[in-house]
Image: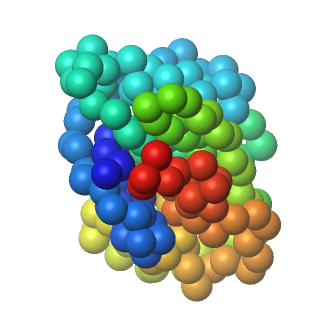
Amino acid sequence: MLYLASSSTSRANLLKEAGINFEQIFFNYDENIKEESPYLYTQKVVLEKQKQFFAKHSNFESVLFADSIVCIENQILTKPKNDEEALKMLNMQSGRNISVINAMILILKNKKIINLSKGDLMLDHFDNNDMLNYIDSKLYQNKAGGVMSEGFHKKYIKKIIGNQSTILGLNIEILKAFYDENN
C-alpha cells in the first residue's frame, strides 16, 4: 500500500484514476521556505515535507510526498492566502503562459525516487465575472497559484504543453514507472 502524505484532493484523484491502492495521510506542513528559483524552491519544499513527516511518523514505508507551484516568468505563485491574493494571482495569469512545477519524492523499502516535472498552460484572457465567481466559491483555496485546470481554468486553456497530471499536482506516469505494489 502507498501512503500519500498530502491533503491534496487532486493528487488523491490521480492515484484513484491510476488504480493505485493508497491511504491518504493528512499532515500540516510548514512550507515557510526562502524563495529561490522555482525549481529549487519546489524541491526544497518537498524535501522539507519529507523531513517533517518522518520526524513524527518514522515507521512508514512506501510514502509519497509532492508539492506544486505555479510560476510566471520565474515569479513563484504559491497557495493564495485570501480572496485579494487570489484575485491578484488570477489577474497575473489572464492571457499569459504559466508553468506548473511539481516535485515528488517516492520513498520505498529499498529506494528513493525524486522527480521534478513541469507543465505549461497557454491561457486566454479571463472573464472578470468568472474570476469573481471563482473567488467567491473559494475553490481556489489550497491550489498553487489558485490554478484549477479541471475547473475554473479549463475553458481558458488554449494549449497544454507537457503532462496533464503534472498540471494537476503529480506526474502519475513517472510514479507508475517506479511504484510497484508488490515491491
Residue 5's place in the image compared with 40, above or below, is below
Between residue 139 and residue 170, name the one nearer to us: 170
Q: Which residue corresponds to the image point at 69% horizontal and 65% vertical from the top-left?
A: 163
Do we see residue 152 in this rendering? no
Residue 34's place in the image compared with 88, above or below, is above
Residue 157's place in the image compared with 110, above or below, is below
Q: How is the image coloured?
A: rainbow
Q: Quadrant of residue 94?
A: bottom right
Q: Is residue 56 left or right of residue 111?
A: left
Between residue 15 and residue 86, name the one nearer to us: 15
Q: Position of residue 159 (x, y in %)?
A: 76, 76
Q: Position of residue 58 (x, y in %)?
A: 26, 20
Residue 30's place in the image compared with 183, above or below, is above
- Report the residue that reaches farthest toward the front: 182
Do we see residue 133 in this rendering? yes
Q: Which residue corresponds to the image point at 24% horizontal and 24% vertical from the top-left?
A: 59
Between residue 132 and residue 177, name the one nearer to us: 177
Q: How many marks?
A: 0
Q: Which residue corresponds to the image point at 74% horizontal and 71% vertical from the top-left?
A: 160
Q: Position of residue 131 (x, y in %)?
A: 46, 71
Between residue 134 and residue 107, name the one nearer to us: 107
Q: Quadrant of residue 73?
A: top right
Q: Position of residue 148 (x, y in %)?
A: 48, 67
- Report the residue that reaches farthest toward the bottom: 155
Q: Which residue corresponds to the image point at 45% horizontal and 66% vertical from the top-left?
A: 14
